[in-house]
Image: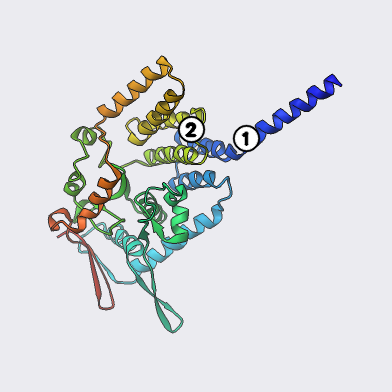
Amino acid sequence: MGIIRIIIISFLFIAVVSLSVYPQAAYYREQLRLVNMLNGRDSLDLQTAVYAVENAYYNGNLNKDVFDKQIDIYAEFSKRILLSGDVRYDGKGDEQSAMTQCAVFVFMTDTIPMQVGDTVIGHPPFEYNFDDYSGREDWSNMFVSRMMETRRGNCHSMPLLYKMIMDRLGEECWLALAPNHMYIKARNQRAGWYNIELTCADFPTDAWLTASGYIHLDAIRNGVYMDTLSVKQSVALCLTDLAQGYMHKYGIRDGRFITQCCDTVLTYYPNYINAWLLKAHVMSQLYQKEEKQELKQEMDKVYTRIHELGYRKMPQEMYLSWLYSLNEYSNEYRIKKIVSFNYGDRHKTISKE
């Protein structure tokens, strides 16, 4: 009887442990997928990386075929805008790239007339999610898949979708960071480098980005803000997103999963400020539970590094005020003419004189 009792207790213990681990299994699978991209075992692919982040949150139940197909549809729609003859660009040598930027921008930010039978209907743009722009109420509001479902996004999902559509069309653009913010950098021969702000459908200058007062010169020098991200850095960013999703869904727990993700990210993207901040947050929470001197010393080193990189915390209310200040400023904070788009009696200018 003693042996049987031990076996039963052992079985119940294993069952309980398995149940507690199983919901997180998708996170460990997708962590491995992203790590293999970063270490070179698998090819780098931003769309797959974004899918991995969101699929883990949905316990492995996000349909990849549907996810990929929707982006294909958006790319095809943008291509039709490009081929419509309504896009105008006066530059020479890079017409395809510049006009593709225009087409994708218009697709995401404007109402496009569509012929359906004998009726013309307007295809609506994506809108900014004012209700939960930072995912505090529902972390899935940070996701591209959620934006494709609701057509409401934020400064995280919007540039990611734009970048994935551009990748699908075989043209270049780059993710870039500002405090609490992500946007797109692009270039053409006529305008040079320019910024694409999808949350308010505009083209702000670098001066507007620094006008917030929260971009320290050291942060620019260290490539923390206002620099283009490589594909590897963009995938590393996704691994940090994976860790954040884990925290929002399961909490910090013992901190190992989140810290491991952050350490991997910092191996391939040493100055990624969000990975440093997330690691510091986890260490701070763990220190509050158990005041170990060794942990305190390590935590102090992390916060010192964050300060050295030039990070200055931007309050959420200040972020929103800054983001929509572009509408109040004069044209000195806007890039003027880049590319022109015409349909019917409407005209849209999106390029530099």
Identify residue type, mark 2: Ile
Query: Could you tell me if residue 23 is visible in this image?
Result: yes
Task: Give x and y (percent) for residue 253.
Answer: 51, 31
Identify residue type, mark 1: Ser
The crowd level at tag 2 (other Cα within 10 Å; few <14, some 14-19, many 20+) is many
Left or right relative to 203: residue 275 = right
Task: Give x and y (percent) for residue 205.
Answer: 19, 51
**In terms of image quadrants, where is residue 342?**
bottom left
**Vertical order, 347 against 6 (above or below):** below
Disc 2 to disc 1: CB gap under 8 Å = no
Residue at x 62%, y 35% (from the top left corner): 20
Which residue is label 1 attached to?
20
Q: Which mark is residue 252?
A: 2
Q: Nearer the viewer, residue 19 or 156?
A: 19
Q: Secondary structure at mark 2?
A: loop
Q: CA distance from mark 2 to mark 1?
A: 14 Å
Residue at x 57%, y 45% (from the top left corner): 59
Q: Nearer the viewer, residue 175 or 299?
A: 299
The crowd level at tag 1 (other Cα within 10 Å; few <14, some 14-19, many 20+) is few
Left or right relative to 29: residue 226 = left
Task: Give x and y (percent) for residue 53.
Answer: 48, 44
Colour setting: rainbow
Left or right relative to 61: residue 336 = left
Query: Could you tell me if residue 177 is visible in this image?
Result: no
Task: Answer with mark 2 or mark 1, whichever residue precedes in sequence.
Answer: 1
Q: Quadrant of the N terminus?
A: top right
**Vertical order, 1 against 138 (above or below):** above
